[in-house]
Amino acid sequence: NWKGEQQDVYSPICLKENENKQFKLGTYPMLTQIEANQALESASNAYNMGMGEWPQMSVGQRIKHIEKFTFKMIEKRDEVVKLLMWEIGKSYKDSQKEFDRTVDYIKDTIDALKELDRKNSKLEINSGILAQIKRSPIGITLCIGPFNYPLNETFTTLIPALIMGNVVIFKPPKFGVLLHKPLLEAFKDSFPKGVVNTLYGSGAKLLTPLMQSGKIDVLAFIGSSNVASQLKHNHPKPNRLKAILGLEAKNAGIIMPDANLEVAVNECVSGSLSFNGQRCTALKILFVHENIVGSFLEQFNTKIDDIKCGLPWDEDVQITPLPEYKKTEYLKELIDDALKNGANIVNKNGGTIKNTFMFPAVLYPVNKNMKIYHVEQFGPIVPILTYKDIKEPLLYMMESNYGQQVSIFGKNSDEIAKLVDGLVNQVSRVNINSQCQRGPDIFPFTGRKDSAQSTLSVSDALRAFSIRSMVAMKNDSDNKE
Ligand code: G3H
């Protein structure tokens, strides 16, 4: 019953070569401010300062609602997978993976909660005090997911928030907005009124007033570091806001002189370019030791030559359309800036743009004066530079605004072990002889500096979206004494 205007959604896929004609996939309503306020009011009524039905419901009952939703969600698999391909250009294989990973995430979350609840139901006795410690919800949660994992990463906050008894307002990303539509009915059928509220529309217009209302207790945001900080600072009582954020990264790959080049090349190609490099965990800058840079580049570029560029449903496709033309313009600006400051495109067809496609560009040698050295490209550009002393990539990481992950390639385990002690204080995950990544989802997923706040993962998220509260009772026998 939304009254807001309908917004058209166009696919970034152009079916005919050399044709810039995008076609309409569907529409979604642009909510008015009044409607957004109604969503907030409905969430507020359902939570009722923690006295609502949902926040007071037993863990077992809440799990039943989530299970009902999951069952209904699975029925929509084909529709959602298709929309993932058409809306954001994700390959068929990766779109299926995103859906199935999300279902597994929900199931694992249920199991983790049962385990947590089992521990919490135990009584603790200390100094004459009998205590039951449990996890309680925090309140009204605003969940905002990113375009690159519009289903999965929205659900990595939405599901744990809900299961812990919070109520949720969630805003689907601009790209990947339609794929949430098939799930609306499932939400409606599976949860009490007001527990899940979908906010369609312009984030720039609707979110600031929501935050300014002071009624949002938890901001769960995955996306750009700047937007997150603007949203946070709009809250009039920042001490009352819990921020759970997954933000930008500039993960470095360090290729040491004794690295197994085949392993390093394979991991760095896939680590930099899976889903067009549009992953926060992608490798976004490579430091190659000067003694091996020649052979590294040769093997790296040969591997990139073989990369298949095509439509999401083409077999073994790796490079697919970017979500909008504007994205190719931004990437081109970064490439031009690097070329102006002394880098070259060193691979065949590197940076070629056709419609919404961009063939990967390998830039070498990259230096500090280039934008690409500092900012997150979130696209198919691989900046490479050489180093002589390991202190150089370490200094890069120390000076960077980001601190999510690093990948280090080499054979000398003693040398690597020595480095790891320092690296874990720079980033939140060190990968040895493998690319950076988020999963498996039971592992903690976070970052330092401008890369994250709080920790997500199956069990960490349950903690993030709750507080430990306690009922304490003075032991009776003590009272008698
Ligand atoms: O975009 C950020 C995602 O958390 C990346 O997840 O490493 O599983 O692709 P992934």
Image: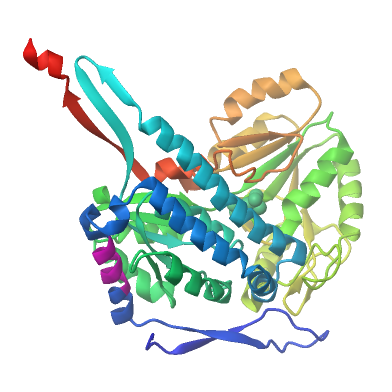
Compared across the picture, whether 88 is left or right of 164 comes to: right
Q: Residue at x 31, y 49 (%)?
A: 138
Whole-percent x, y for residue 301 in the image? 88, 53
Q: Nearer the viewer, residue 329 or 171?
A: 171
Q: Is residue 5 visible?
A: yes
Q: Quadrant of the C terminus?
A: top left
Position of 474 with respect to 66 (left or right) is left
Asked which quadrant contains residue 75, the reply is bottom right
Location of residue 21 (image quadrant): bottom right
Q: Residue at x 34, y 69 (%)?
A: 193
Magenta stretch, overall SS: helix
Is residue 41 rendered magenta in the image? yes
Instruction: Name the residue: 39% across, 81% down.
Output: 31
Is residue 181 depicted above or below 426 in this figure?
below
Vertical position of residue 213 compared to residue 372: above or below:
below
Q: Is residue 279 left or right of residue 348?
A: left
**Direction left: furthest residue:** 480
Q: Is residue 335 magenta?
A: no
The location of residue 168, given as percent across then percent down, is 38, 61
Please tell me whether residue 275 is drawn above or below residue 25 in the rendered image: above
Q: Which residues fall within the magenta stretch? A: 39-46
Q: Where is residue 438 drawn, in percent x and y?
A: 62, 46
Residue 340 seen in render: no
